[in-house]
Image: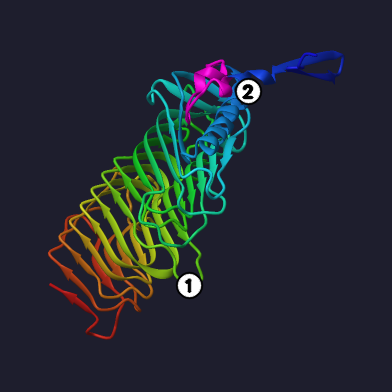
């Protein structure tokens, strides 16, 4: 005669009786009131003050988006999240099968207004384009906060790797990723992308724990983790306090993803600022106009060709006498390292520092116009790195300007 709209959960906890009531009709009513695939999250009655779990309501909004896009045939949709703090005790997820959703937009009211808080081990948002490569995702104008240590990934996106897509499958812009109230809490990953074509990360600021009393400064694994992702671009962004700022990783057995552009960004207090690690030698890396201040390595490039590293300010944040390497190139070719400045970050001695190291298998490279205002070795060329040109570099304070280990007599050209 009447519909049962409320589900009651009774839990016996010691001597306490906990009764949880959730109105499942709320989500259905809110979704029915929406005519098109533009979802206003406020219709799902979230608390928005950070005191209650809003993950079920945000999941309902995502499920509603899939339903509306499917019924309307639009294959696209928008979730608009209003100002407020929305605590997520569970990660919200959307799995879009082929033909369901081609375009998803998740938009807040601004990075200082809309806050998603991760109170779980998985993170905030996971979008899984499970069986097709054409789906696109845009996330913008909000802040993500970790409410616990190991709070997962603020944003995770997965698509099938490889193929050929002439589009940007992922755009993340105007985002802050941090923690609440200067605490020791942190995300393991800021943005974790797998198999995504031409992702753009613009104006994204991320930090792990920081400050003079922070104990977990390097606990965040990676700010921007890009695995098997083709031609990513990171611009005007910031990573502070992490093991790695950018990690571009490929383990493809045949042909891995090409391309990488990182510009006008800062990677400070990281173990490694930028790490490009591929199993096959694919073309194109542009790293320009950045500030990198790490404690183990600044820029690491492995198995790449046509690499441009220019106009960067390189610091060494570690105040101990460590074997720091600003730029390490391994098994790469056609590498241009020009017009960078290498600077000591403190007055401590850094005699074991190496600003530029061409390691095994690196060939046909150019190092020119760099300024070395750092201690230790300016340029180190290993024995099996060959056909390299050094020109117009200025050495101010290095104890060793050039250490060329090659003994063949005609491998390195110095001008």
- Quadrant of the image containing the N terminus: top right
Q: Quadrant of residue 278?
A: bottom left
User: Residue at coordinates 77% horizontally, 13% vertically from top-left?
Assistant: 2
- Above or below, 341 relative to 15: below
What residue sits 50% from the left and 59% below the top?
Answer: 161
Quadrant of the rendering where the C terminus is positioned:
bottom left
Q: Which residue is mark 1?
A: 254
Which of pointers 1 and 2 lies earlier in the amino acid sequence? 2
How many other residues sit within 10 Å of disc 2, few (<14), some (14-19) or many (≥20)?
Answer: some
The magenta span reads: 30-49
Task: Specify whether 115 is left or right of 53.
Answer: left
The one nearer the camera, 149 or 317, is 149
- Asked if residue 148 shows in the view, the reply is no
Based on the picture, tell me whether residue 288 belongs to the magenta stretch: no
**Numbered marks: total:** 2
Q: Is residue 16 above or below residue 122?
A: above
Residue located beneath label 2 in the image: 28
Q: Residue at x 37, y 49 (%)?
A: 168
Q: Residue at x 44, y 66 (%)?
A: 256
């Amino acid at each position: 005669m009447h519909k049962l709209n409320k589900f009651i959960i009774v839990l016996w906890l010691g001597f306490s009786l906990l009764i949880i009531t959730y109105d499942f009709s709320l989500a259905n009513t809110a979704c029915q009131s929406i005519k098109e695939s533009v979802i206003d999250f406020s219709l799902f009655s979230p608390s928005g003050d950070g005191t209650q779990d809003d993950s079920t309501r945000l999941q309902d909004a995502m499920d509603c988006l899939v339903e509306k896009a499917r019924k309307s045939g639009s294959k696209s949709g928008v979730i608009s999240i209003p100002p407020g703090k929305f605590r997520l005790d569970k990660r919200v997820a959307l799995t879009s099968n082929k033909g369901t959703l081609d375009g998803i937009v998740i938009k807040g009211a601004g990075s200082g207004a809309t806050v998603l808080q991760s109170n779980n081990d998985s993170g905030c948002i996971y979008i899984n384009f499970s069986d097709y490569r054409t789906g696109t995702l845009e996330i913008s104008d909000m802040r993500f906060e970790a409410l616990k240590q190991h709070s997962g990934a603020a944003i995770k996106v997965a698509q099938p790797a490889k193929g050929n897509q002439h589009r940007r499958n992922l755009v993340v812009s105007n985002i802050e990723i941090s923690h609440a109230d200067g605490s020791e809490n942190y995300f393991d990953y800021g943005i974790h992308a797998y198999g995504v074509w031409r992702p753009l990360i613009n104006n994204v600021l991320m930090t792990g724990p920081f400050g003079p009393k922070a104990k977990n400064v390097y606990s965040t694994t990676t700010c921007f983790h890009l695995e098997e992702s083709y031609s990513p671009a990171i611009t005007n962004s910031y990573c502070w306090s992490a093991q790695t700022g950018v990690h571009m990783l490929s383990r493809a057995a045949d042909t891995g993803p090409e391309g990488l552009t990182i510009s006008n960004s800062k990677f400070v207090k990281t173990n490694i600022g930028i790490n490009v690690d591929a199993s096959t030698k694919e073309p194109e890396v542009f790293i320009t106009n950045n500030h990198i201040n790490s404690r183990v390595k600044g820029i690491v490039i492995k198995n790449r060709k046509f690499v441009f590293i220019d106009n960067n300010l390189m610091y060494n944040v570690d105040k101990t006498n460590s074997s720091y390497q600003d730029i390490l190139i391994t098994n790469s070719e056609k590498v241009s390292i020009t017009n960078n400045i290498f600077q000591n970050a403190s007055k401590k001695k850094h005699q074991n520092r190496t600003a530029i190291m061409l390691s095994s298998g690196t060939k046909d490279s150019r190092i020119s116009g760099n300024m070395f205002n750092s201690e230790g070795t300016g340029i180190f060329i290993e024995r099996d790195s060959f056909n390299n040109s050094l020109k117009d570099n200025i050495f101010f304070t290095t104890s060793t300007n050039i250490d060329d280990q090659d003994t063949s007599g005609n491998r390195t050209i110095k001008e």
